[in-house]
Image: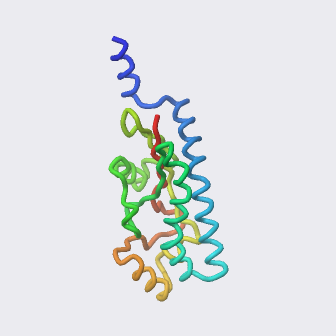
């Protein structure tokens, strides 16, 4: 009987208090990565230009992510980013994220969300919106030289034609309960 009650409670997903705790944890894992990535991209655009920023994103973003994952992996915490319009196909959505990508894109969801992946794992998703800086590489009017370097680095790029405020994708965190 007790096992049945416990399984019913877990089947209902996390409580509001648990969701708040998971959100806080997830943001503490994601924020350093997000801040460093934006700082590096912004600094590169300002000092070296957009073409250099494409190379920085292509070469440095995975290294920045890996650096932040080093201490998280020990605790079975994973973080990443994904989109329905991929530039880097290594960022393809995990199976548990696919449904939520559609919901965010269609406007059914707006802010961060905690989701149950399975009885042992919790997921956290935070939307990525297009900011003015993003338009240099993801907008409707991209400089030809920038387009060329993007095509060289990302031959199957789909991440273009965005406007400020558009939904770009999701940051995600996966962690143990």
- Please, is residue 7 above or below residue 89 in the view? above
- Left/right of residue 171 with respect to residue 44 in the rendered view: left
The spot of residue 169 in percent (x, y) is 45, 59
Looking at the picture, the colour scheme in use is: rainbow
Q: Quarter of the image holding residue 174? A: top left
Q: Quadrant of the N terminus?
A: top left
- Please, is residue 84 above or below residue 14 in the view? below
Q: How many marks?
A: 0
Q: Residue at x 41, y 60 (%)?
A: 83
Q: Residue at x 51, y 58 (%)?
A: 128
Q: Nearer the viewer, residue 107 or 98?
A: 98
The spot of residue 96 in percent (x, y) is 35, 47
The spot of residue 117 in percent (x, y) is 38, 40
The spot of residue 109 in percent (x, y) is 45, 47
- Please, is residue 102 above or below residue 156 in the view? above
- Please, is residue 13 above or below residue 162 in the view? above
Q: Nearer the viewer, residue 113 or 153?
A: 153
Q: Quarter of the image holding residue 134? A: bottom right
Q: Nearer the viewer, residue 65 or 149?
A: 65
Q: Residue at x 54, y 67 (%)?
A: 164
Q: Residue at x 55, y 41 (%)?
A: 23
Residue lying at the far top in this picture: please name it: 1
């Amino acid at each position: 009987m007790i096992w049945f009650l416990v399984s019913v409670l877990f089947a209902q997903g996390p409580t509001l208090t648990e969701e708040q705790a998971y959100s806080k944890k997830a943001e503490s894992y994601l924020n350093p990565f997000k801040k460093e990535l934006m700082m590096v991209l912004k600094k590169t655009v300002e000092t070296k230009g957009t073409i250099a920023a494409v190379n920085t994103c292509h070469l440095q973003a995975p290294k920045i992510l890996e650096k932040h994952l080093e201490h998280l992996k020990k605790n079975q915490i994973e973080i990443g980013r994904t989109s329905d319009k991929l530039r880097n196909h290594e960022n393809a959505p995990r199976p548990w994220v696919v449904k939520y990508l559609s919901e965010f894109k269609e406007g059914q969801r707006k802010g961060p969300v905690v989701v149950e992946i399975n009885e042992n794992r919790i997921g956290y998703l935070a939307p990525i919106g297009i900011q003015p800086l993003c338009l240099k590489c993801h907008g409707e009017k991209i400089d030809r030289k920038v387009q060329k370097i993007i095509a060289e680095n990302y031959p199957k790029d789909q991440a273009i034609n965005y406007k400020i405020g558009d939904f770009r994708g999701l940051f995600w965190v996966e962690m143990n309960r």
